[in-house]
């Protein structure tokens, strides 16, 4: 298999910028595109702070930091993805927006070997249908933060070719990640389907007055040996993301089990999204 020449990432939010950064850390040139300059500026500052912190802790040298910046480029120009060997879409978790992005990417770069989505739960098949080459479209679902979390779900759409899946797995491995194959395109894939069930049960325990969220978090951490409890994790993930994933699971499956619990819906509607907004189930210092 030919070496990946350049990874293109559409979207410079928390996940998109970090995916591009992970590639650059592992020697892969990467271009990260976002049409909003302020998002690019925040991404660059966030990643530079992360690398300087690594240097301070002896985990990285200044030379390595400079080498990463030589490989990693940010741009507001959509055409910066025109020569990418791989493209990973990492925009807002909205199917209509993603389908539009895939249609544009397909037209922009007909030579791209792979068009992948970092979606955490949406239909890869539906995104692929917006392109002229659905056999080359797949999901590459990284986990937050991608520089630390080893797992990548490699999701097959209805028409994804075996060759495309192998390329997806190979790219994940080259980025130092561990790929797992999701053979069928189902809402939530593997991890989020299991995780959302845990979130639902934690939310129901809270709503039923069985225990406080603090005690539920403590019970899960100590009883299941998890690094954080469900309410802390929901705040870390983002309650907008959690709400939309559950809403999507509910709409796609028709199963009332997945209907977002009221406490989560109210947090979402109130803008209490968790760590990124300063308040969610818990309150955070700026």
Image (cartoon, rainbow, N blue to C red):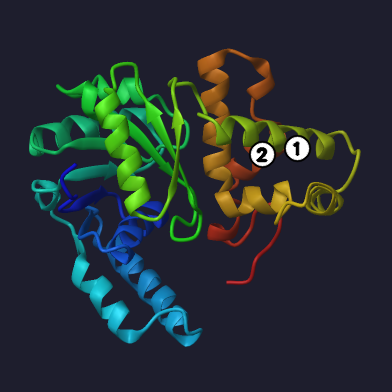
Q: Is residue 83 above or below residue 181?
A: below
Image quadrant holding the N terminus, namely top left
Image coordinates of residue 97 in percent, x first then y, are 30, 33
Q: Which residue is mark 1?
A: 203
Q: Where on the picture, by quarter, is residue 50?
A: bottom left
Which residue occupies 8% across, 34% down? Answer: 110
Extreme top residue here? 254
Image disc number at residue 264: 2
Left or right placement of residue 173 versus residue 105 in this view: right
* Residue beneath the point at 27% across and 71% down: 68
Which residue corresponds to the image point at 19% horizontal and 72% vertical from the top-left? 70
Towards the viewer: 78 or 111: 111
Nearer-the-camera pick, 273 or 91: 91
Q: Secondary structure at mark 1?
A: helix
Please tell me whether mark 1 or mark 2 is closer to you in this view.
1
Secondary structure at numbered mark 2? helix
Please tell me whether residue 19 is drawn above or below residue 192 in the rendered image.
below
In the drawing, does residue 179 fall left or right of residue 115?
right
- Labels 1 and 2 touching (C-beta < 8 A): yes
Within-10-Å neighbours for mark 1: few <14, some 14–19, many 20+: many
Label 1 or label 2, whichever comes before in sequence order: 1
Q: CA distance from mark 1 to mark 2?
A: 8 Å
Taking the spot 37% from the left edge, 49% from the top edge, the residue there is 173
Instruction: Count up the numbered dots.
Output: 2
Crowding at dot 2, Cα within 10 Å, few <14 / some 14-19 / many 20+, comes out as many
Q: Position of residue 47 (x, y in %)?
A: 37, 70
On the image, the x and y values in percent for residue 227 come to 70, 56
Up the image or down, 256 lies above or below 274; here it is above
Q: Residue 30: in sight, yes or no? A: yes
> In the image, which disc is placed on residue 192?
none
Question: Can you see residue 97?
Answer: no
């Amino acid at each position: 298999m030919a070496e990946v020449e350049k990874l293109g990432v559409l979207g410079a939010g928390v996940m998109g910028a970090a995916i591009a950064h992970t590639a650059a850390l592992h020697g892969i040139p990467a271009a990260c595109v976002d049409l909003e300059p302020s998002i690019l500026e925040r991404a660059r500052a966030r990643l530079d702070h992360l690398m300087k912190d690594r240097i301070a802790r002896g985990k990285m040298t200044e030379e390595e930091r400079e080498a990463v910046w030589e490989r990693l480029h940010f741009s507001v120009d959509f055409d910066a993805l025109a020569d990418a060997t791989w493209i990973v879409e990492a925009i807002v978790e909205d199917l209509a927006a993603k389908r539009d992005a895939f249609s544009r990417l397909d037209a922009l770069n007909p030579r791209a070997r792979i068009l992948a989505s970092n979606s955490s739960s949406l239909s890869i098949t539906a995104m692929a249908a917006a392109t002229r080459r659905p056999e080359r479209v797949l999901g590459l679902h990284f986990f937050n933060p991608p520089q630390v979390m080893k797992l990548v779900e490699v999701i097959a759409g209805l028409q994804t070719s075996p060759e495309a899946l192998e390329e997806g797995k190979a790219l994940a491995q080259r980025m130092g990640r561990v790929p797992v194959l999701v053979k069928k395109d189902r809402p939530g894939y593997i991890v989020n389907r299991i995780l959302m069930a845990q979130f639902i049960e934690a939310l129901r325990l809270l709503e039923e007055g069985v225990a406080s969220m603090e005690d539920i978090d403590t019970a899960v951490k100590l009883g299941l040996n998890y690094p954080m409890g469900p309410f802390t994790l929901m705040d870390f993930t983002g309650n907008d993301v959690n709400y939309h994933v559950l809403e999507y699971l509910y709409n796609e499956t028709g199963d009332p089990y997945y209907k977002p619990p009221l406490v989560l819906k109210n947090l979402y509607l109130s803008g209490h999204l968790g760590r990124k907004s300063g308040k969610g189930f818990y309150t955070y210092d700026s």
